[in-house]
Image (spheres, coloured by chain):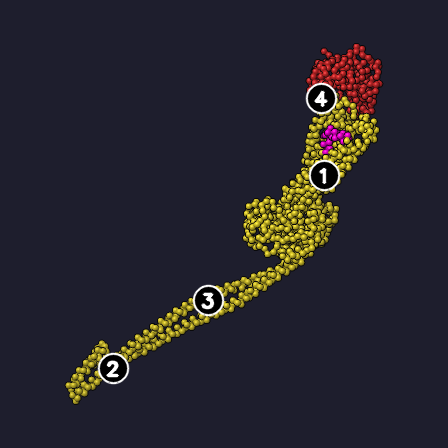
Chain colours: A yellow, B red
Amino acid sequence: MFMFKNTLRKIKHSLGRFITLILIIAIGAAFFAGVRETSSDMIRTMDEYYDKTNLMDYRIVSTMGLTEDDLTALKNLNNTEVIEANYTYETVIDGDATKIYGITHDINNVTLVDGKMPEEDNECLVLDGSYNIGDTIIIEDEDYGDYLKNNTYKVVGTVNSSMYIYSNLGISTVSDGKLDNVIYINKDNFNMEYYTEIYLIAKGSTDATSYRDDYDETIKELNAELEELAPIRETIRYEEIKTAAMEEIYDAREEINNLKSENEEKFSDAKEELDSGQAQINSGYAQINNALAELETRRTQVLTELDNNEATLNTNLAKINATLTTYGIVTSNIDESINALNTEITNLNNLLATLDETNPQYQITVETINNLNTLVTSLNEIKSGLNEITNARNEFNNTYNETLNTLNSNREDLDKQQETLNENLEEYNTNYAEFQNQINEGLTEIANAEAEIATLEKPEWYLFDREDNSGYTTFLESATKIDSIAAVFPIFFIAVAFLMCLNTMTRMIEEERTEIGIFTSLGIGKFKIIFSYIFYVLLATLLGLLIGLTIGYTIIPHVLYNVYTQSYIIPGLKTYANIPICISIIEVCIITMSLVTFIAVAVKFKNSPANLLRPASPKNGRKVLLEKINFIWKRISFSWKVTIRNLFRYKKRIIMTLIGISGCTALLLTGFGIKDSISKILDIQYGEIEKYDSMLFLNESVTEENVEINNLLANNNIENPLYAHMETLTFAANNKNIDVYSLAFLDNDISNYYDLLDLNGNPLSLDDEGAIVTEKIADILNVDVGDTITLRDNNNEIYVIKISGISKNYINNYVYMNTNYYNLVFGDISYNTIIANINDLGDTLLASEYFSNIQYTEDSVSTLQDIFDSMNHIVFLIIGFSSVLAITVLYNLTTINISERTREIATLKVLGFNDKEISMYVYRETIILTIIGIIIGLLVGIGLNAFVLTVAETDEIIFIKQIHYLSYILTVVIMIIFTIIVQIITNFILRKVNMIDSLKSVE
Amino acid sequence: MAFIEVKDLTKIYQMGEVTIKALDNVSFSIDEGELVVVLGPSGAGKTTILNILGGMDSPTSGEIIIDGTDISKYNRKELTKYRRYDIGFVFQFYNLVGNLTALENVSLANQICKNPKDSKETLASVGLKDRMDHFPAQLSGGEQQRVSIARALAKNPKILLCDEPTGALDSKTGKMIIKLLQNTCHKTKTTTIIITHNAVIAEIADKVIKVKNGTIEDIIIHKKPKSVEEIDW
């Protein structure tokens, strides 16, 4: 109990030392635990998020859509846990490539951030940070009806999606090839006959941790099943489509035939009817015409006969009139003549009556009377004849007119009939032409469909897993980068922390030498004494660990993570206290610290108690080596001589100080060095080595320069397009396959787009003898110019390539060659890529038929930038912690230095040294140590930087290990500033040193 | 006017709630070149007198006039200057810098003075001519104390203050040191003040100031001080 009290009092007494001890342990533990934990916390957080939102393991897309049968087949796979089919549609809205999804509920669930889920068909969700709630989105595509029921949507909610955790949403099939927006609508608002995507979750994948090996293992089996099923379903779907199309054609043809047979009869009946109608009309007209002709003939006959009869009568009349004249009768008409004759007769009869029969006159008169009577009879005959003719003529004329009228009215009727018939005919003709057109159209359609079937290609299934999601993989890379740095730094921190603790404890025990002696002589057991010190140390260690681990497991991961979320849309970090690691850290710390203390105290027990009670015999002063070099020693001022002598007196402290200062310097320099490397690497790779701004992927490969493409490019002012064949190959090393991009160029001169330099900085050029490979390939395979390397394509074909040059390269692995060499090794070349500077003309070019996709250098850079930024953030953390550590270490060392020499300093004060001289007396040592420490630190830093960057390198990245001179300067300046800060603090401690201490006996 | 004039010197230490009167209206005077012993038991206040005379502490009240100047109101800086130029201090435990040779220890003090004595000569004068390049650990206690005296003398101080100079030494060596101090005092006319609890040493002093419970008990002036050979303890 008493020992505990004693220890607690010690803590109270030298609170500064105790706190420093706690701080140093805390920093070491915080950094060690924090940085180590961050990446696994990140991965676990994301795994939980993926599980919660049911992120798919596989996504299947087919070139011809997916059917209900496909869904069933997939559902029936042994390793399918959850499955859901969905509709999607990609379109351009306001110039943004937008993908519209149906809202899923079993897989790839969205998390509502604000607003509500859509209820109506014209409501939609958007990714948080794009549109605002209340915005209206209008689909501009005129053919939207083929895909969607509506074209206007109101944003009612914003969501996050585990499919889209990264600011870069990935690729799109429309616009410039970069997906800009994602919208979610209710599934039943799609108008499509088949699904566009099917999502699958593999059995057991939820229990496996995403990104970890067990996840890859878990989904492997489903993958195998899918690979097996895909060709089967492809064929079935192909047959289905083909059969359906054929059936449709058959039906169409039958329909046409029916149409034909039905309508043709109808048309011919109608035609016949029309024709017979016409014939009737025609015969009607003929009858009328005949009747008319007959009528006229008869008229002529009748009139001629009548005229003849009249003429005869008139001739007879004339003869009679002539006779009459002889009788002296002249009249103008028959009736007068008759009257005149009758008068004569009467006269003659009267005469006769006077005359006797024998009178010659008589006879003559009788004869004359007879003659006259005959004349009268003739005249009466003529007169009635003429009347008869007139009557006949009148009668005939009446009949003629009547007949003519009848005929005319008949003709009018016929005219009307003809008119109707003409109309009918015209209608018939129009209908018939239309009918013919219909048939022809149908036939053409059938012919087209047939042609289409003939060229119908098999549908292709595309299998995407999570690794095809750029957000998913980029996140892992970011997290892994932290890990790779975490592998090296914390050990450094922990090492420095242990050294400092050792130093502090040794000093403390040295100071309390007498006390230990007293306790021992009082008969207090060794272990009790040792334990009192271990208790002191453990108290500090546990408090330090408590603070350090708390910070390490909470604040550090959060700080790192929050900086990440700037480019990710993901839930907040969940920190998991990693109990096993936590315990092992605590164990290691407790054991090490106790051991250190135990040894330090145990050494003291070698002395007898009496010995301990006496002051430690002062360390022998010794001349230093430098003094033997007289000509230098002579030139050094007395104060500096004293300083140098002092320095060499406490070798342990020098070493500690040097390790502390140089360690912190090295950490700082490494921090800055990593930053240098990161900031330069992208500029060099994408500004100096690869100079093009885009790669255009051709829809169809060409075997030579294509004039039309060249014209298209030329019309858009795109000059010097470089045709290339690009292919991903692999080479095997370290038990895995490493990707290599093989690029074969049409032109031998690629200097417009590439500056390939060898490792000494001399330019390289392509030739027919071999290929240029990038540095990392040569490094991994340990090959040199003139050697060969073996590459495989994805069909496992092997190609052996001779190295004609090794080029400086930092990101990705490339094999560059010219067409001749490609032809030699791989066979006939076909160019699938054009490298060019297209200056924002992506939309125009993608709109043409030639290009399927465009890869922008800028996008690659920004993705990598995000990954590298994550390294940058940890660098800041390292710099921050190094700084705190540096100050603590410097402070600790200086205070120990002063406490060891309180008596000396007090003496100097008594001797009349002023404050400045006293400070300088101590500072001179610090200055020398700081200078030497910084120099050593810079050298170590160069190595540490190279080491850390080498560890952080992947199979695709080489870091620039050269540190910018400004970083050296900055490191030195920061260290000097720290030294000055600590010296200012020290100054206060120095002033407090009491001169009376010099009068006390040596302890 | 005496070389050192102490008037009504009072020093009160405030230790939390407790007030300790270390010196209570102490007055005495010392002439130039005098060898003075301040004698008293532990806790009598002699160390306080030493601290104040040595410029390491300031009194609560009273005057200390040294060579006509009152140092009682000196500030930190002035006190440093006073220690630097006017005081030579000899410690009970020598307080040599361990990693400096005897010569260097003397030179260390030397370099901050206005007209220091030659270090080598001073060392020779304390009888260490042949041990100059030795480190303290290589020297005996008496030799170390001589270096300490040499270091104080080399500054050419107005007052040589010795704090129990024989306290850590056996009596034979102690006597040699006392002799050295007496000789030096007489030879160089340096005012020497020895603080001790050893009444025997007081016999060689020109003046003995006896301190008890923070007050002056007595001041004895020896017209004929004893020589070192005559005393023993």
Residue A85 drawn above or below residue A303: above
Q: What chain does badge 3 belong to?
A: A
- x 82%, y 28%: residue: A521
How far apart marks 2 and 4 lie (CA) works out to 205 Å
Q: Is residue B69 visible?
A: yes
Camera-nearest label, 1 or 3 = 1
Question: How would you classify the magenta stretch by its main secondary structure?
Answer: helix
Helix, strand or loop under label 4: strand
Observer-nearest of A724 and A516: A516
User: Which range of residues does the magenta coloring cover?
Assistant: A2-22
Q: Which mark is residue B18?
A: 4
Which residue corresponds to mark 2?
A: A378
Residues at marks 1 and 3, CA–CA distance in whole angstroms: 101 Å
Q: Residue furthest bottom?
A: A358
- Left/right of residue A726 with respect to residue A619 in the rendered view: left
Q: Which residue is mark 3?
A: A425
